[in-house]
């Protein structure tokens, strides 16, 4: 029993190489096919992501079902990811290569249908993103972009933006001034 827990069945060097290779392959595949998946994870995308992890599992572990092999694979994955992520932060060029650039999906209150279709997005899903960020629909936006990490960033027109702290502070100051005028008897109807 204890032998099965710690006998990897393959060399730790092979397991390390397998893990790094699969990480890089999945990273490249997600770079080219995954921006939409990160932006709007629907049922179909969730199924693909779950199956993807299962598909690459054997490539990572090989014939190994040991705890020590799993621990090594997990440690290698985390280490490689940390190195890649930090390298992308330090190098703008590498960051753009790995993550891509923002994509404008709407401009001046209109969806850019070609870009929306290119990324396999539905305008109904994008309308939900606009509502989540305070707008009623795309006509209230100056731009909507799909960022490299998959986030949708909505910029609302000035008049359609929600009140911020400065707006509230200005209203409070006006109310305070009206109260003072009322208390002084200076407000006449």
Image (spheres, rainbow, N blue to C red):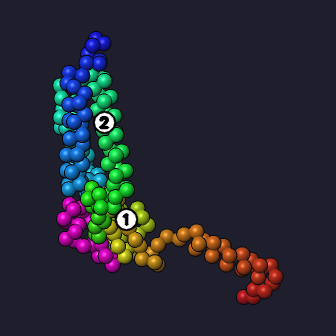
Position of 116 with respect to 92 (left or right) is left
Q: Which residues are magenta?
A: 106-124
Q: Nearer the viewer, residue 177 or 32?
A: 32
The circle drawn on residue 106 is none
**Residue 180, image quadrant:** bottom right
| Residue for badge 1 | 153
Q: Secondary structure at mark 2?
A: helix
Real-space Cα separation, disc 1 to disc 2, in angstroms: 33 Å
117 part of magenta stretch:
yes
| Residue for badge 2 | 76
Quadrant where the image shows the C terminus: bottom right
Point 27% across, 22% down: residue: 66
Position of 151 with respect to 31 (left or right) is right
Q: Secondary structure at mark 1?
A: strand
| Percent coordinates x, y for residue 155 in the rendering | 40, 71
Q: Residue furthest bottom?
A: 188
Position of 11 with respect to 166 (left or right) is left
Q: Is residue 124 visible?
A: no
Point 46% across, 78% down: residue: 159
- Label 1 neighbour load within 10 Å: few <14, some 14-19, many 20+: some
Q: Residue furthest right?
A: 184
| Percent coordinates x, y for residue 112 in the rendering | 24, 73
Q: Which is closer to the viewer, label 1 or label 2?
A: 2
19 part of magenta stretch:
no
Disc 1 or 2, which lies upstream in sequence?
2
């Amino acid at each position: 029993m204890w032998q099965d827990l710690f006998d990897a069945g393959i060399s730790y060097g092979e397991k390390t190489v397998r893990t790094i290779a699969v990480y890089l392959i999945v990273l490249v595949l997600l770079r080219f096919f995954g921006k939409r998946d990160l932006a709007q994870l629907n049922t179909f995308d969730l199924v693909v992501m779950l199956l993807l992890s299962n598909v690459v599992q054997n490539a990572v572990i090989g014939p190994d079902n040991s705890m020590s092999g799993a621990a090594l694979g997990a440690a290698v994955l985390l280490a490689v990811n940390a190195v890649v992520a930090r390298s992308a932060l330090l190098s703008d060029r590498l960051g753009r290569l790995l993550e891509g650039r923002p994509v404008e999906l709407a401009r001046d209150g209109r969806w850019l249908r070609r870009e929306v279709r290119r990324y396999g997005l539905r305008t109904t899903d994008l309308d939900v993103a606009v509502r989540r960020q305070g707008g009623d629909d795309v006509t209230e936006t100056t731009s909507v972009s799909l960022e490299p990490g998959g986030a949708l960033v909505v910029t609302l027109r000035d008049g359609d933006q929600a009140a911020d702290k400065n707006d509230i502070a200005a209203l409070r100051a006006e109310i305070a001034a009206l109260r003072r005028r009322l208390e002084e008897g200076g407000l006449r109807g």
